[in-house]
Structure formats: structure tokens, C-alpha cells
Amino acid sequence: MKNIPLKESEPLCPMSPYGITKMTTEQYMRVYHELYGLDATVFRFANVYGERQGEKGEGGVVSIFCKLLSQGNPITVYGDGNQTRDFVYAGDIASAIVQALPLTGYHTINVSTGTETSINDLIRSFERAIGHKAEVQYAPPRPGDIQRSVLSNKELVQTLHMKPEMTLEQGIARTYTWYKHPM
């Protein structure tokens, strides 16, 4: 089993073409720094969510749930719901990027809450936001889905002197409200 929470120093071993492209980009940035002195900061984001996020692509469980629940539809959970993710609000991602602008040298920084949240706990946050129980359908786990995912944010705290401020409860309520009444 992986070391949890994952630190920036963990060996990279991508399990998907998407992960391979991310690793390759990091290596290009590292080499350009070493060869040409280019300042570079690599951000590794946890599961980002927030208003205006689409329902497709990587890590879109929050936006998928928002869309379905705002339309009064049931949500589907693949697996038993005990699988975990580290959910970080898009506004906190933006803050980290702004804080990193003056950095020099080469840095790799996880931007995460450092908190492991189960999908079942995520659903409970949604239920508080919508004001009633959600209709949940459980389906067999999908091949390749990981059971636990959380990133260490110690480097974020040490290098940028910040921690994500938006709680999951506040962020889900805000995101759901936007989906229900887009501006």
C-alpha cells in the first residue's frame, strides 16, 4: 500500500496515460530548470472542485453529484463509498498559485487539504447542502479506481505559508448553490 498521505518526494509510478503526461511535464520542467535556470513550480492538486467545473474529466465527482442532485436525480457510487479522496476548493488552488508567483528555483508542491474524506462523507455534506437525504445507488467498483487518496500539504505550509481555507462543508454548499442557480 502507498504511503498515505502522499508526499512530493514519493517515487512517481503513473497508472494511466493521464498520469504519464503529468509526470512527463514535471520532468521537462525539472530539466529546463537544471539546464537553463528556469524558475518552475510544479503543483500537484488533490481533487479540485468548485463552481463552474464541468462534469467530465479527472476528479469531477463533486460536479457530477452537483448536477445530478440539482436536477433531482439519484447519484451513483462505484464501490461501497468508503474509498477516500482529498477534496480541495478551486479558490484555494488559485490562492496557492498566486502565493507561488515570487518563488525562485524549482519546487514541487501538493495543494491539498491533507484530509481524507470518504465518498459517503462527501454525500453527507451534499445532504446538508440540499436539505434532505440523497438517493444513492451503489454499483460495483470500477477497475483501476484507488481505495485511498490524500496528499500531504506540509510543503504547501512550509514553502507558501498557507493552508486551504475553505472547509468541505462550505465548499460543497457553495458549489451546489451555483449548480442549482448558475450565474
Image (tube, helix red, strand yellow):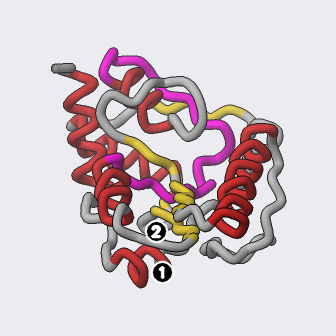
Residue 49 on image: x %, y %: 40, 42
Taking depth in this image into account, of 104 and 123 the one nearest to the observer is 104
Rendered residue at 33%/15% (across/down)? 71
Residue 31 on image: x %, y %: 73, 62
The 10 Å Cα crowd at callout 2, few under 14, some 14 to 19, many 20 or more, is some
Q: Amino acid at mark 2?
A: Thr
Taking depth in this image into account, of 135 and 33 the one nearest to the observer is 33
Q: Is residue 76 magenta?
A: yes
Rendered residue at 56%/29% (across/down)? 76
Taking depth in this image into account, of 143 and 14 the one nearest to the observer is 14
Q: Amino acid at mark 1?
A: Lys
Q: Which residues are magenta?
A: 70-90
| Mark number displayed over residue 154 | 1
Farthest residue to the front: give it: 36
The secondary element bearing badge 1 is classed as helix
The secondary element bearing badge 2 is classed as loop
Rendered residue at 62%/54% (across/down)? 83
Could you tell me if the residues under marks 1 and 2 are in contact, i.e. CB atoms within 8 Å? no
Residue 17 on image: x %, y %: 80, 38
Which of marks 2 and 1 precedes in the sequence? 2
Does 163 sit left or right of 81 as displayed?
A: left
Rendered residue at 83%/59% (across/down)? 13
Does 111 sit left or right of 150 as displayed?
A: left
150, above or below 105, in the image: above
| Mark number displayed over residue 26 | none
Q: Is residue 22 magenta?
A: no
| Mark number displayed over residue 115 | 2
Farthest residue to the bottom: give it: 158
Q: Check the picture and name the quadrant holding the C terminus.
A: top left
Q: Check the picture and name the quadrant holding the N terminus.
A: bottom right
